[in-house]
Amino acid sequence: MNPNTWLSFLTTTIGAAATAAATDGIITGSAKQAIISAAGIAVPFVWGWFVHSNASVVQAAAAIPGVKAVEIAPTAAPELQKIAMDPTVPKVQVTSTYRS
C-alpha cells in the first residue's frame, strides 16, 4: 500500500460517514441532509480524480519501495516532464530514447 491508498480509504470513509449521518437522522433538516449527501459523493469523487491524474500516478509509483526508476518519454506531457526534471524526485527520469 502507498500513501494514496490510505488517503483514498480516508476520503471514502468520510463520504460514507456523511451519507450515513444524513440518512440515519443524525443531522436533521432537509437542507443539511442535501449538503451532507452531496459532500459524501463529491469528496471521494474529487479526491479520486486528483489521485488518478498522470502526474500523481507517476509520483506514487516512484515512491513505492523496490521501484528502480520511472522513465518518462521525451514526448510526454509537460507536467510529467516537470516531475522528471525535479531533483526531489530522483526515481523519475526522462529517457534518452523512446521505447513503445
Image (spheres, helix red, strand yellow):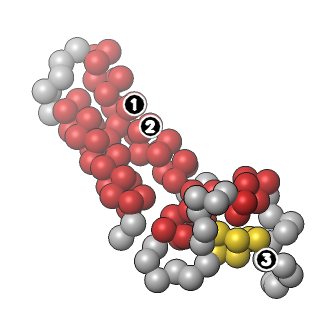
Q: Which residue is mark 3?
A: 95
Instruction: Tell me the amino acid under the disc marked 1.
Output: Ala
The circle on residue 84 is none
The circle on residue 38 is 1
The circle on residue 42 is 2
Comparing 49 with 75, the one in front is 75
Residue neighbourhood size for the residue with mark 2, other residues' Cα within 10 Å, grouped as few (<14), some (14–19), many (≥20): some
Comparing 100 with 89, the one in front is 89
Q: Is the residue 69 above or below the residue 88 in the image?
A: below
Q: Is the residue 2 above or below the residue 10 in the image?
A: below
Mark 1 vs mark 3: in front: 3
Mark 3 vs mark 2: in front: 3
Image location of residue 27, percent across then percent down? 18, 23
Image location of residue 94, percent across then percent down? 76, 71
Say left or right for 57 vs 100.
Answer: left
- Give the spatial CA distance, label 1 vs label 3: 43 Å
Q: Quadrant of the N terminus?
A: bottom left
Residue shown at the point (47%, 45%) measured from the top left: 47
Image location of residue 14, percent across then percent down? 28, 42
Comparing 56 with 88, the one in front is 88
- Give the spatial CA distance, label 3 vs label 2: 38 Å
Q: Quadrant of the C terminus?
A: bottom right
Q: Earlier in the sequence, mark 3 or mark 2?
A: 2
* Disc 1 to disc 2: CB gap under 8 Å: yes
- One can see residue 8 in this view: yes
Residue shown at the point (18%, 18%) measured from the top left: 28
Instruction: Tell me the amino acid under the disc marked 2.
Output: Ala
Say left or right for 14 vs 65.
Answer: left
